[in-house]
Structure formats: C-alpha cells, structure tokens
Image (cartoon, coloured by chain):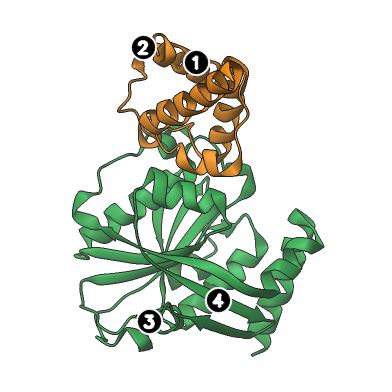
Amino acid sequence: MLDLAKMRLVHISDLVKSTGWNSLVKELVFLKRTAIVVEKDLSVVTERSGPLESSGLKLLEIDNHMVFSGGYRFAVRHRYLKALNYLKHGYRGLAIARDNVVVGDMWYSASETAEDPRVLHVDLRRFGFETWTKTYVYTFDIFVAASERKGGVSAAFQNNAMLYLRSKGYTKAFGFYWADNFAAHWCTHVTNKWKKIRTVNVSRFLIFTKATLPKK
Amino acid sequence: MEGLLEKVQTAFKSAFGIDPQTITLDTSPEDIPAWDSMGHVTLASSLEQTFGLTFDVDDLMEMENVREIYRVVQSKLDKVKDAQHQ
C-alpha cells in the first residue's frame, strides 16, 4: 500500500514537472472521456526496426532480475515504481533501452492461466470483454520518455513489441487509447493500423473509475 | 487537378527532407519513420504553405495517408474555387 502511494506521488511529481498542473487534474478528474478499444491481428505485423536501430535502442523483456539486478535504470523515476508495481501484480513488460537506461516500457497481461478476461485485467471488465482465448494478450500503459518521442520510435517500439508477443505464441493483441490523445491515435491506429472495435465513455474522480459501455 | 501530387510531394520534401519521388498515393506513415504525430503537424504546416490553405483538427485526423491528403486538399481547393466563382 505504501509502495502504491509512493508510486502515485512520484507519478504526480513527474507529471507536474513535465506538463504542469492542468495535465494532472485532467488525469485525475474527468467526465465521459472517450476510450477507443483496439485490436491487432499479430499475424499481419511486419518487421520495422529502423527507428529503434538508428536511435541505438534495443528491445528487452522486463522481469524481476532485470529490475532488481541493478543492470538497468529507468530514465523516468515513476516508470521504475510502476514496473515494481506491475511485476508484483504478475504483469509482464517490455522495454526499450540504450546504454542500460530504460527510456520506454509497455505492459501486457498474459493469459495462460485464465480464460475469463475480467480477472486478467480491470480494463477488460470495464471495456465489456466477456470471452477470451489463451492466445490473446492485453497490452497497456505504453510509455516513451519525452526526449525519445521522435523519428517514429514510439510506433516502432509498439510494432516490435507485437512481433515479440507473436514469437511467444500470441495471435491477437488488445488495448486502448484515449480519443483525445492524438499522439496515441497516430501511433496505434494510423501507423501501426490497430483496428477500432468499440468506444467506451470513462469517468474518473481520483481513484474511482466508471466506464459506460455503448448500448447493444 | 494537374500537379497536385507534385505539390504534395514538395510539401513532404519540405517537412521530412526526403526524395519527393518516393511519395506516391499509396505512401502511409509506416513508410516514413519521421511521419509520427509531431511530424504530421509539421507536414500539415508545410501543406498549408504550399497550397495556401488552412486545416482544422478534423482535417488532420482524416489525412492518414497520401491518398487521404490528396482528397482533403482537392476538396478544399474545390471549395475555394467555388467561392471565387460565386
């Protein structure tokens, strides 16, 4: 609980420092913000490593050893604390790193042990997923440090992460982005061609989140 | 409109410094690493200067590839022409 509180405080501190108080308020309190739920057939993903290679970045898996061995450090403080929290919850992560510094990370919920999407990740329950197969994977919280958001690095990271997940036997990935996040829209839908499957209105007040599914 | 694609190619050259001949109607952001969300804003600015047009947010969202850029630009140029004839 204390770790979670510390992570939130550091996240708030990083957010205020980088983008100001307005973005903090926007993150914590909103009414009917539209989430675009998307899917990607992993069989059609093609190799596109150029932007990562030209930026000297390599893709690696985030696991307990990687985080605790001291071999790598996170460029952004709150992402390290998030990594600790996600690993504790059993989620798996992928990172891009240069010179042993992690400058981007994304997370996924592996489904080998559960076929009920509602227990895999809270987002899947909120977004109305009712069926699931073990070859599906839910991806979430992709982050790239502000200094690296250029030259298609974010899109290449997402693309190469999907290639990695395909190599692990997954056939389809799901995720979401906020409709008002143009950068996420561009990276996910336009460049990497994830297909929109539904929109969900989400309201949040501090730690309380409510999603309203479209009527069938 | 004759020459419209050539002007679009010029805008791409200006925005991304690439060989304009590599730009075709089938070109999309996955073909040009620099054409990310920030690059798209730079490209839109370059297109505005090239054609003397102004794009709104909806236009930016629609212009997901060169074919769509061509369609949006042509539509806006047609509207300008119609307004001049009235």
Is there CB contact under 8 Å for labels 4 and 3? no
Chain painted orange: B
> Label 4 vs label 1: CA separation?
41 Å
Is there CB contact under 8 Å for labels 2 and 3? no
> Label 4 vs label 2: CA separation?
45 Å
The correct choice, above or below, for B59 with respect to B9 in the image is below
Kind of residue at disc 4? Val
Q: Closer to us: mark 4 or mark 2?
A: 4
Residue positioned 52% across, 74% down in the render? A201
Q: Residues within 10 Å of mark 1 (few under 14, many from 20)?
A: some
Residue B66 location, quadrant:
top left
> Label 2 vs label 3: CA separation?
46 Å
Quadrant containing the C terminus of chain B in the rendered view: top right
Residue behind mark 3: A128
Give x and y (percent) for residue A100.
52, 51
Q: Secondary structure at mark 4?
A: strand
Residue behind mark 1: B13
Check the rendered structure and report the hue given to chain A: green
Residue at mark 3: chain: A
Q: Closer to us: mark 4 or mark 1?
A: 4
Give x and y (percent) for residue A141.
50, 65
Kind of residue at disc 1? Lys
Kind of residue at disc 2? Gln
